[in-house]
Every structure is written in C-alpha cells, then in structure tokens.
Image: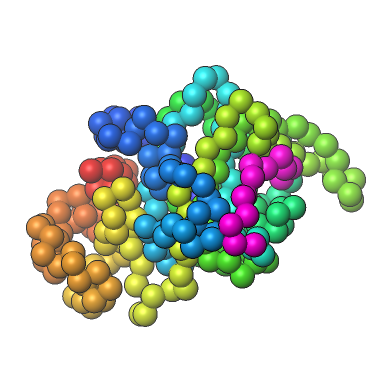
C-alpha cells in the first residue's frame, strides 16, 4: 500500500478547501470519524458506508488537538468474537511490515520510516491532508475485510535490531491524551476490468490517475449507475481540472489534481 503526503504548498492550498468542509471540526475529515463503537461494525449491528476496492485511491485528512505529534495506524478485523470491543493499542512499530495485535486484529504503520533523518514517523499537530492509494491490506494475516484508520499520540526512538543494526521504533500510546478512529469500511478485491476510483467525502469519483476512455466510463457507470447523470462528467465531458491532469504531469497538473479532489 502506498501513502502520499501532499507537498507543503499544495497541502496548504488544499487545507483552505478542507477548512470550509463541515467535517473539519471532526478528528478525521475523510474517512469519516467513528460514531459509536467499532464493535458495532464487527458484530453486524452497524454497516460500513464505504465499499473500497483494491487499487482505489482515497483522499482525506485529519485534525489533531494540542501540541502532540500524531501517528497513523491501520487495523483490520481478525478473529475477534462478534460484539467484542476493540481497544486502542499500545504498540511499537519498527518496519512497514504489519503484525497481529493481542486482540487478533491486524495492525500496521503504513508511513513508517527507519531512516535516521529529519523526517520522522509522526505528523505535526493540527490539520494534515493525505492521499492514499494501493492494494489495501492485501497481505494481512487475518481473514477480515473490515478495516479502519486510527490516530494516536506517540514518539520515535532509536534502538538496535536483533541483527545489531540501528533501527527507529515508533511507539503509539493508546492510553495517551487522545485517540481517534475512523468509521470502518469494507475492502473488496479488485473490480471487473480492474476498474479503480478515487474516494472522497462526496463519494466515489473517476480515478484521477487513469485515462478516462469510453471503456473506462462504461465500466464506471456500470459500477455506479446512480452517478451517470452527474453534470460535467462522462466521455468528452471531463471538468477542466480532470483534463489538465490527463494532459501532463507538470506541477500545474498536480495542482489541478489536488483541486479536483478537494472540491
């Protein structure tokens, strides 16, 4: 799975649009913050509102309080019994390889970095936009397809691995000053013809990284027939921002991509 932080100038511009969103006062802007208990979803009491497929992209972000760094983790259901409560973690991460938590959920820090440089594993306090894309959770050791993101306060420290090489350890504190979780969402295998889309708070949109051929639009509307009447989309009707992205990979194209996602 590949996660991408937005470049600082573009992130600032993007945040100006996110700030106008009614969700900005929530911890997560997208996926939406958890409203209730994660165990409601693992027990079947509540149903996931977003159906994500392998290869899709998702644009969202979060806002954290105070002055603490935030650390992003994802988890997926495992062999937890129906109705059981999934609790926040107190875990260490020393690679991008995930592992099983004590409650048998899969946990992973997708943006982990072991490099001894100025870029740590945490994020500055406040608002952080992020675009994430890839084959979601394909190699976790559970059979669960219900996954969610969590935010924790935490810290980076340096230690020594079993083979004697230096390593950086990211520690998340589930019993710290705060802990946030998103609403869980279902993760499906790839769609027919490997159709991929970009998810944001307004729902599924055409994949901004794909060439929108007539065949793509046919597959898109077959998957999401209720979106066929959307204005300004369809063969030959891409918005100006979409068209700019398809015509090149310059920084203007990247800016257009951000605007297209954020608006």
Q: Which of the 4 image quadrants contains residue 194?
A: bottom left
Image spot of residue 228 (x, y percent): 15, 67
Q: For this view, does 203 lie left or right of residue 52?
A: left
Vertical relation: 145 (above or below) 251: below
Vertical relation: 223 (above or below) 200: below
Quarter of the image where the N terminus is located: bottom right
Q: Is residue 1 visible?
A: no
Between 230 and 235, the one nearer to me in the picture: 230
Main structural element of the magenta stretch: helix, strand or loop?
loop
Image spot of residue 206 (x, y percent): 27, 62
Residue at screen point 44% across, 57% down: 46
Q: Which of the 4 image quadrants contains residue 30?
A: top left
Q: Is residue 138 visible?
A: yes
Q: Which of the 4 image quadrants contains residue 103?
A: bottom right
Quarter of the image where the C terminus is located: top left
Between 83 and 234, the one nearer to me in the picture: 83
Judge whether residue 85 is colored magenta.
yes
Q: For this view, does 118 lie left or right of residue 242?
A: right
Image spot of residue 167 (x, y percent): 78, 41
Vertical relation: 187 (above or below) 34: below
| Magenta-drawn segment | 81-93
Residue at screen point 89% across, 49% down: 162
Residue at screen point 25% across, 31% down: 20
Judge whether residue 57 is colored magenta.
no
Image spot of residue 65 (x, y percent): 49, 24
Q: In the rendered picture of this protein, how many numbered marks are placed on residues? A: 0
């Amino acid at each position: 799975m590949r996660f991408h932080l937005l470049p600082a100038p573009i992130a600032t511009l993007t945040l100006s649009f996110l700030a106008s969103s009614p969700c900005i006062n929530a911890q997560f802007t997208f996926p939406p913050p958890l409203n209730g208990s994660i165990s409601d979803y693992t027990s079947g009491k509540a149903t996931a509102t977003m159906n994500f497929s392998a290869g899709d992209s998702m644009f969202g972000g979060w806002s954290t309080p105070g002055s603490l760094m935030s650390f992003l983790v994802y988890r997926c259901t495992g062999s937890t019994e129906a109705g059981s409560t999934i609790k926040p973690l107190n875990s260490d991460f020393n690679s991008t390889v995930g592992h099983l938590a004590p409650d048998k959920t899969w946990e992973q820090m997708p943006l982990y970095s072991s490099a001894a440089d100025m870029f740590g594993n945490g994020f500055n306090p406040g608002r952080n936009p992020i675009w994430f894309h890839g084959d979601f959770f394909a190699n976790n050791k559970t059979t669960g397809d219900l996954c969610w993101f969590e935010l924790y306060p935490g810290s980076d420290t340096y230690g020594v691995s079993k083979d004697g090489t230096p390593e950086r350890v990211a520690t998340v504190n589930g019993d710290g000053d705060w802990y946030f979780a998103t609403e869980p969402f279902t993760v499906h295998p790839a769609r027919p013809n490997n159709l991929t889309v970009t998810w944001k708070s307004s729902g599924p949109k055409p994949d901004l990284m794909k060439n929108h051929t007539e065949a793509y639009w046919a597959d898109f509307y077959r998957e999401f027939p209720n979106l066929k009447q959307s204005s300004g989309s369809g063969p030959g009707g891409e918005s100006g921002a979409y068209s700019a992205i398809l015509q090149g990979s310059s920084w203007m194209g990247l800016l257009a991509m951000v605007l297209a996602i954020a608006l």
